[in-house]
């Protein structure tokens, strides 16, 4: 126990002394706080300011995530052909301009749902490029043995933003109105771009393979993910979770405002309270992985916490609204544990030249379900009411662990060492999902939570957040 705590302080101190990682962490914090404000403010613009019906609110959520389905795969191949830091800076500037157009249109009296759809779509496209480049850039900033600690620090920052951001957003909406609260998001993206400009790491310009067309590189990334038994199950599980998470995102503002009767400020506090579970998950992930094993944590986290989604539709006016926060907090706790166990594994497994395509392929597969879920949520809410749509979301979360329960992960405690049994693109071997890697094998064979320090700097999301907009599903 003592050595674990000592190593925790060493890992955390090492990251604090890493100048470029400090700038990367600051950029993540600025962008995440702004994005979490918009998580509350943008749907409230539609629900309160423009009086949009439930299906149109669902369509807004679908527009935010449609870019992952439309351009996710070519974006990954393109990112692998260019330097990643400039991509992130430009994406932040595009998002700042898009978000800044909302309060400007409100001042001019010309704000419409059509503009919100365009803003959501443009922001989503920029987010695709940012997220793929960001996940592929971290291994350039940190040595591979510090990736778990680095991902953990980023996850703790994201979770803290998810706790503070919605409450700030709800308060700003209450004071300024929903359109003007979105200025905080635009400012956050601008500050994030400035922080990224402070990074000095020299990033060589990748050379495009001579004579290899873009579609062939896309196919290479798809092959790497779909032929890998662990990545394949992760993609199926996360895609299912994101489908039902998007359904919830599309109706939660309508549900909490029109059914539970929450004011904008109370709505923000509700979402902040829900996000406390994610922060707790970031703090507990390292010890949990050491206690049960990184491979076990992937499926246990979803099995144990998923049923708490059934508390969502029990929320109602007054004190009954707290059921939504309790259910969300526990589900969010499990989502962060899940991400801790799998994001750094992906980064350690994949060669640098393929990181962009691997991350983009997974984003395409797991975020591509979100526009469909958002449209379905809006349609169900329009036809049967917001509470009925929330019941469908809650029931759907019971299905999330099934792919993992029928995968070879059930027979493993730890994930194998980096490169152990792994295969490059185009190979068909079983890769690291070797059934012989069971409880009897020696734990801690690769850098991971079992070898990293305790505390928030030693765990591994995304997007991202694990979580860009959703607050309930894994990445």
Image (cartoon, rainbow, N blue to C red):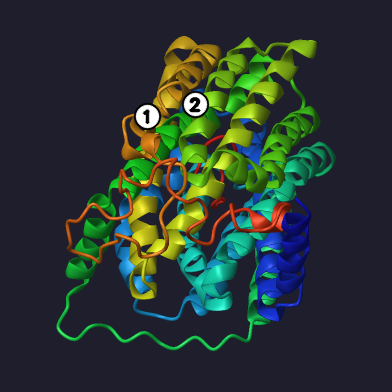
What mark, if any, has residue 282 been given in the picture? none
Q: Residue at x 42, y 58 (%)?
A: 346
Q: Which residue sits furthest right?
A: 175
Residue behind mark 2 = 303
Q: Position of residue 396 (x, y in %)?
A: 43, 22
Q: Position of residue 212 (x, y in %)?
A: 17, 78
Do the residues under discs 2 and 1 have CB atoms within 8 angstroms?
A: yes
351 or 35, which lies in front? 351
Please indicate whether residue 97 sits to the left or right of residue 433 in the image: right
Q: In the rendered view, would you say 92 is above or below 4?
A: below
Q: Position of residue 463 (x, y in %)?
A: 55, 52
434 or 83, which lies in front? 434
What mark, if any, has residue 405 been given in the picture? 1
Asked whether residue 469 appears in the rendered view, the answer is: yes
Residue 125, quarter of the rendered image: bottom left
Q: Earlier in the sequence, mark 2 or mark 1?
A: 2
Residue 354, quarter of the rendered image: bottom left
34 or 449, which lies in front? 449
Q: CA distance from mark 2 to mark 1?
A: 9 Å
């Amino acid at each position: 126990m003592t050595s674990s705590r000592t190593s925790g302080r060493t890992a955390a101190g090492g990251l604090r002394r890493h100048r470029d990682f400090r700038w990367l962490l600051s950029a993540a914090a600025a962008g995440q706080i702004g994005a979490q404000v918009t998580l509350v403010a943008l749907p409230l613009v539609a629900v309160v300011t423009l009086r949009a019906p439930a299906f149109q609110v669902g369509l807004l959520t679908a527009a935010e995530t449609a870019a992952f389905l439309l351009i996710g795969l070519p974006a990954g191949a393109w990112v692998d052909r260019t330097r990643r830091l400039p991509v992130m800076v430009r994406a932040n500037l595009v998002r700042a301009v898009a978000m800044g157009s909302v309060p400007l249109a409100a001042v001019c009296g010309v704000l419409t749902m059509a503009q919100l759809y365009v803003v959501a779509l443009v922001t989503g496209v920029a987010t695709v490029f940012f997220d793929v480049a960001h996940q592929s850039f971290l291994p350039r900033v940190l040595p591979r043995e510090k990736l778990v600690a680095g991902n953990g620090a980023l996850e703790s920052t994201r979770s803290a933003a998810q706790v503070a951001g919605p409450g700030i957003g709800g308060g700003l909406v209450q004071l300024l109105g929903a359109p003007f609260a979105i200025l905080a998001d635009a400012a956050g993206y601008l500050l994030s771009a400035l922080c990224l400009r402070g990074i000095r790491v020299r990033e060589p310009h990748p050379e495009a393979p001579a004579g290899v067309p873009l579609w062939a590189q896309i196919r290479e990334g798809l092959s790497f993910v779909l032929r890998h038994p662990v990545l394949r199950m992760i993609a199926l599980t996360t895609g299912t979770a994101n489908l039902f998470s998007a359904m919830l995102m599309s109706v939660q503002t309508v549900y909490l405002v029109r059914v539970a009767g929450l004011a904008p400020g109370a709505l923000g506090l509700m979402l902040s309270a829900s996000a406390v579970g994610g922060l707790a998950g970031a703090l507990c992930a390292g010890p949990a992985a050491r206690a049960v094993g990184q491979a076990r944590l992937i499926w246990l986290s979803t099995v144990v916490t998923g049923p708490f989604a059934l508390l969502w539709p029990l929320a109602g006016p007054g004190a009954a609204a707290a059921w939504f926060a309790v259910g969300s907090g526990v589900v969010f706790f499990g989502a962060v544990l899940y991400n801790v166990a799998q994001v750094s594994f992906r980064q350690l497994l994949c060669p640098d030249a393929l990181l962009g395509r691997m991350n983009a392929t997974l984003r395409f597969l797991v975020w591509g379900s979100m526009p469909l879920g958002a449209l379905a949520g809006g349609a169900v809410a329009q036809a049967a009411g917001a509470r009925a749509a929330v019941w469908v979301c809650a029931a759907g979360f019971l299905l999330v662990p099934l792919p993992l329960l029928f995968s070879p992960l059930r027979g493993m405690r730890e994930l194998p060492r980096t490169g152990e049994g792994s295969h490059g693109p185009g190979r068909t071997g079983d890769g690291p999902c070797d059934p012989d890697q069971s409880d009897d094998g020696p734990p801690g064979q690769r850098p991971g939570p079992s070898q990293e320090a305790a505390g928030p700097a030693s765990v591994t999301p995304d997007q991202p957040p694990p979580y860009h907009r959703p607050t309930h599903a894994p990445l």
